[in-house]
Amino acid sequence: PQTIHLADYTPPNWLVTGVHLTFRLDPTRTRVLSRIGFAPNPDAKSREFKLDGEKMTLIRAKIDGTEVTPHVTETGLTCDVPDGPFTWEAEVEINPSANTALEGLYMSSGMYCTQCEAEGFRKITYYPDRPDVMAVFDVRIEGGEPVMLSNGNPGKMGDGFAEWHDPWPKPAYLFALVAGRLVAHPGTFTTMSGRDVDLNIWVRPGDEGKCAFGMEALKASMRWDEEKYRREYDLDLFNIVAVDDFNMGAMENKGLNIFNSSCVLASPETSTDANFERIEAIIAHEYFHNWTGNRITCRDWFQLCLKEGLTVFRDAQFTSDLRSAPVKRIEDVITLRARQFREDNGPLAHPVRPSSFVEINNFYTATVYEKGAELIGMLKTLVGDEAWSKALALYFDRHDGQACTIEDWLRVFEDVTGRDLAQFKRWYEDAGTPRLSVTDSYKDGIYTLHFRQETPPTPGQSEKPPRVIPIKVGLLGQDGKEVAETRVLEMTEAEQSFEFTGLAAQPVPSILRDFSAPVILQRETTNAERAFLLAHDTDPFNKWEAGRALAREGLLAMIRSDAAPDAAYLEASATMARDESLDPAFRALALGLPSQDDLAQAIHDAGGTPDPQAIWDALEALKDARAEAMEDTARGLYDAHQVTAPYAPDAAQSGARALANAALAMITRRDGGAAAQAQYDAAGNMTQQLAALACLLQAGKGDLALGRFYDQWQDDRLVIDKWFSLQVGYAAPEDAAEVAERLTQHPDFTMKNPNRFRATLGALAGSPAGFHHASGKGYALLADWLIKLDPLNPQTTARMCSAFETWRRYDADRQKLIEAQLRRIAGQEGLSRDTAEMVGRILA
Ligand code: B3K
Ligand code: ZN
C-alpha cells in the first residue's frame, strides 16, 4: 500500500462548481446519479482528470451530455476531458446492505445512513474526494422511506422523494444522508440575530423518551458559541440522528450530525452521570465543528488537528463553563495521560500534525485530538486571553469558506501579536512527550527554579530541539499560604532558570499548575511535601496532582519492595475526603487511584519491567488498607452525600453521587456487599444501579444482580453493552479472558455492532492484569477476534490493535506471546490496509 506524504501536497487539478445527486434507494442495489460541474483550477499545474471511487459499479458516464468510457480501476477512474469547464454525469450502483465497514452508505437497524469522513464519499460516487475541493450540494432522495434527510435546508418534499439544498460550499466528507423509519424529538432555537432554527433529534421509534437531554445540550451549545465566539448557526434547520452501528462517537456533517446512539440517547434510568456529561460534550463538539471544521475546513488530512484540536479545546471550555472547570481539567488530564501519553511513548507515536500516513482513519488519535487541544491551550496561555479572542475573531473572518493549514492558523496569531511562533510550531511537528525536570534553590530571599527539557526519540524522529513550554508556577509559604501567585514561566531553552525575589523564607513550589503543558514533570521531592500540597495548594489541579503522586509513590514502593501501604497517604487522603470545603466531585476524583496502565508506564519509565499481576495486587492491597483505615469516614461520606432531590445529571448531583459511590466501594470491602446490595435494590437511576452492581461484582456477590440486570434491560442495547463490559472489567485477572470468551458466545454478542464488540473485547484490552495474564490467553482471544472482524470492519479492527502498543514494556515471555499474535494478524491473507498499517507500526 502507498504511503501519502504531506510534502507531496499539490492543489486539485479541477474544482467543483456544483453537485447534484439523486439517490434511488434500495437495500442491495442503490443507484446514485451525479451531475457535477468541473472547472480547471488556475493554481494547478496539470489538467489530468481523476476521480476517487471504490466498491461501486459504474453504469454510465457522460461529459457535457455525451456518453464517455472512462478508465476504471479499484480506486477510481480517469477520463479524457475538455480543456475548459464541463459537466460530468455518472450513474453508479452500490450495495448498502453489504457494507459492514460502516463507511460510505450503509444500513443500520434497517435504516440507511452514511459516514464519509475521512474518505467514505468515494464509496458513494466518483468524486474528487479531498477536503480542499468544496462545493454546493443539491440532493434528491427517492425510495419512499418515511423520513429522508440530507444536508442543508429542505427543498421540495413529495410522495416518495425529498430534496435538499445546502447553500454552504463543503468538502465531500461532510456529506450525509439518512433514510428510514425515524421519529423526531423537535425543538427550536432563536439565533442572536433573531432567526428561528428548527432542531430535531431523530431516533428509532421507542427511543423518543431519551432525547430531551440531548436537545437541551444542543441549545446550550448554540447559545454558548454565540456568547463566547460570536458564532451563529447558518441554516434554517439542524438535525441530529442516532444510529446503532457506528465506528466512532459522532460526525459533524453539515446540518445533519450523525451520532452513535450511545453518544446522544440519555435517560436517568439507562444512562450514568458520566454518560450524561459525555453526551453533552459530544453534542457540543459536533455542533462547534460547524465553524471549526465546516465553515473553515482542512486543506488536507494532515491538517486534521486544525479542526479537531481546536474543537476539542472549545468543547472543553464549554464543559468547564457549564460544570466545574477544575473537575473537567482533572478528568481531561487523566485521559490525556491514559491515552495520549501512552501513544506518545510507544511505537504508534506521531506528531500532532503527522507527515505521512497509509490509512488516514488510523490517525484519528489521542495525539491529534487531545494533544492537539493541549497545544491550543498552551497557545492561549502564551498569548493571553485578549490576544486569543482577537486571533479567533481574525481566524473566522479571514478564513471563512476556506480549506486551511496549521500555517494559516499560526499566522493569525503572529499577525495579532507580532510574535514569532516558529518554535511553537515544533509542538505540531515533533512527536513525543517532553520530560521536564526541575531543581530548586533558595538564597538571600531569592528562590530559583531550574528546568531541563528533553524529549525521547520517537519513530522516525531521533533529535528533538527544545520547545517553548509555558509553565504555570505559584509558591506557598511554610504556613500553607500562597506567597507568589500563579505566573507563567516561558521556557524556550533546553535548560533555563527562573528567579522569584523578595521571599522571606524558602517556599514550597506548585509547578505546572492547571497542567499548563503536556509534559512529564520530574522532580525529586518528599512525600511530606506532596502531602503539604494536597492539603494547601490553591490550584485545584496541583492539589489533585499531589494526592495522585502520593498514591503513585506508595504503590510503586509496594510493587517494588512489598512495602506496606503508606500510612501518610492514607491519613492525607482521609483528611482530604472529609474536607467539606472541597467540591464532592473533586474529592471523588482525588479518591481515584492511578490506573494499572499508569503504574506500568511509570515503572517502565524508571527503567523497570512492569508485572501486571503485581500491579493489580498492590492496587487491591491499597484499596483494602484504605477501606479499613477509612471505614468510619466512608460511612459518613456515604450517608452525607445521598441525593434526595429528583434526579438531575448536573455537576452538583453527579459530584455527590460520585463521592457516595466512591465511599460505597470502600464500604463494600468491609461489609461484603450488604450496602451495595441495598443500593442496588433501591436504585432509581443507572448511576446508582451500575455502581452498586460493580461493587457486588468486586465483592464476588454479583451473580444474582447480574441476572436481574439482564432481565430488566435485555431490550436496551446500550444498557446491555454496560452489562457486557462490566463483567469483563470486574473479572479477576485469571478469569478475564474466559469471561470475555464466554460473552462472545452469548446470543446478544455480535461483532457487527462496534459498541458491542468494544464492550466485550475492548473491555478485555482495557483490563491490564487480565489482558496481560501470563498465560497469554488474553492476547490470543483478542487476536482471534481482530482477525475475524478485519474483513468486515477494518476501521474498528485497526483501532483496537492499539491494545498491543505497549508490548515492549513487558518481560521477554509476554513480548514473545504478543509478538506471535501480532505476526499471526499480520500474516492473514487479504488483511486490510488499516490493520496492516497498525500492526506494522506496532511491530516496527
Ligand atoms: N470528525 C469525526 C471523526 C471522523 C472519524 C473518521 N474515522 C468526529 C469528530 O471528531 O467530531
Ligand atoms: Zn471532532
Image (cartoon, rainbow, N blue to C red):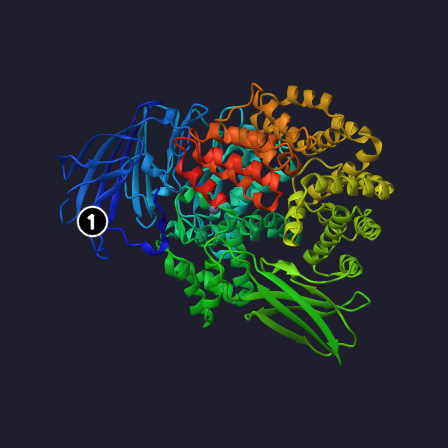
- Is residue 416 left or right of 781 when viewed as pictured? left
- Is residue 18 left or right of 378 when viewed as pictured? left
Q: Which of 514 and 155 is in front in this view?
A: 514
- x%, y% of residue 114? 39, 34
Q: Nearer the viewer, residue 273 or 5?
A: 5
Q: Quadrant of the N terminus?
A: top left
Cβ at disc 1 under 8 Å from ligand 1? no
- Is residue 561 left or right of 813 when viewed as pictured? right
Q: How crowded is mark 1: few (under 14 residues within 10 Å), some or many (20 or more)?
A: some
Toward which corner of the image does residue 98 lie, by quadrant?
top left
In the orientation shown, which residue stands out farthest toward the right?
A: 632
In the orientation shown, which residue stands out farthest toward the bottom?
A: 444
Q: What element carries label 1?
A: strand
- x%, y% of residue 338? 61, 47
Q: What residue type is labelled 1?
A: Ala
Q: In the figure, 336 relative to 486: above or below?
A: above
Look at mark 1 in the image and give the residue it sits on: 39
Q: Is residue 276 visible?
A: no
Q: Can residue 93 be seen in this view?
A: yes
- x%, y% of residue 730? 69, 32
Toward which corner of the image does residue 536 lie, by quadrant?
bottom right
- Is residue 628 left or right of 261 when viewed as pictured? right
Count how many numbered circles sit on residues in the image. 1
Q: Which of 636 and 553 is in front in this view?
A: 553
- x%, y% of residue 229? 49, 56
Q: Which of 20 and 345 is in front in this view?
A: 345
| Residue at 33% across, 23% down | 26
